[in-house]
């Protein structure tokens, strides 16, 4: 799997093994993508709306092309399949992001949750857990949810 990650970053974003280890943006993209994918899966129903939202949000927020996004989603899906906790993702985000960036990630997660038109209890639980692990203040958690609600109503 490490070779797949290396191949992705080398061919699509550019870099070597050392660059993967030291480039915070690449690690952040993988961590955020993994959380978005987990959000789409957490309710035990992979709705096409949620999966489409994952792709769209990754492309628009990370400035990736469709091939890059496909590869990132594939790698992040593998990470999610083998994860034992959210820590491997949230620790990267905590290291690389300030509170406002973490709130943006929460907003993206809420957008995935709202993509199918309903919030499942598992989705809400995951969002509360991630917000706690990211140490996002309550006011910013509420603002992220409201912003995602507003965007999903369009």
Image: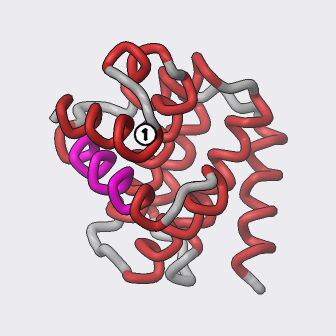
The magenta segment? 70-80
Per the picture, the main secondary structure of the magenta-coloured stretch is: helix
Residue 51 seen from this side: yes
Label 1 element class = helix
**Does the segment drawn in magenta span residue 72?**
yes
In this rendered view, identify the residue nearer to me: 131 or 18: 18
150 in the magenta segment: no
Residue 133 image position (x, y, % from top left): 54, 28
Quadrant (top left, top right, bottom left, bottom right) of the C terminus? bottom right
Q: Position of residue 31 (x, y in %)?
A: 45, 37
Seen in the picture, residue 81 relative to 50 is either above or below; the reply is: above
- Image quarter hosting the N terminus: top left
Q: Name the residue rendered at 45%, 48% in the picture.
A: 33
Describe residue 64's horizontal placement relative to residue 86 as left or right: right
Measured from the top left, where is residue 3 in percent x and y?
18, 32
Query: What colour scheme was applied to this rendering of the protein?
Result: secondary structure
Left or right: 65 in relation to 37:
right
Q: Residue at x 36, y 56 (%)?
A: 73
The residue located at (44%, 59%) in the rendering is 69
Q: Is residue 57 above or below residue 127?
A: below
Q: Crowdedness of circle 1 by 10 Å Cα count: few (<14), some, many (20+)?
A: many
Question: Where residue 32 appears, x then y in whole percent?
Answer: 50, 43
**116 versus 91 height, above or below:** below
| Residue that label 1 marks | 30
Q: Is residue 122 visible?
A: no
Which residue sits at x=46%, y=29%?
Answer: 27
* Lateral position of residue 14 relative to residue 130, left or right: left
| Left or right, 25 with reference to 120 | right
């Amino acid at each position: 799997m490490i070779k797949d990650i290396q191949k992705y970053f080398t061919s699509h974003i550019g870099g070597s093994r050392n660059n993967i280890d030291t480039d915070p943006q690449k690690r952040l993209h993988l961590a955020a993508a993994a959380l978005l994918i987990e959000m789409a899966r957490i309710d035990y129903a992979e709705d096409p709306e949620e999966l489409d939202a994952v792709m769209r949000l990754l492309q628009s927020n990370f400035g990736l092309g469709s091939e890059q996004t496909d590869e990132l989603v594939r790698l992040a899906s593998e990470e999610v399949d083998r994860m034992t906790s959210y820590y491997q993702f949230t620790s990267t985000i905590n290291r690389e992001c300030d509170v406002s960036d973490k709130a943006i990630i929460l907003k993206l997660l809420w957008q995935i949750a709202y993509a199918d038109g309903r919030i499942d209890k598992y989705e809400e639980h995951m969002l509360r857990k991630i917000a706690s692990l990211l140490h996002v203040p309550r006011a910013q958690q509420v603002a992220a949810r409201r912003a995602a609600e507003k965007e999903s109503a369009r």
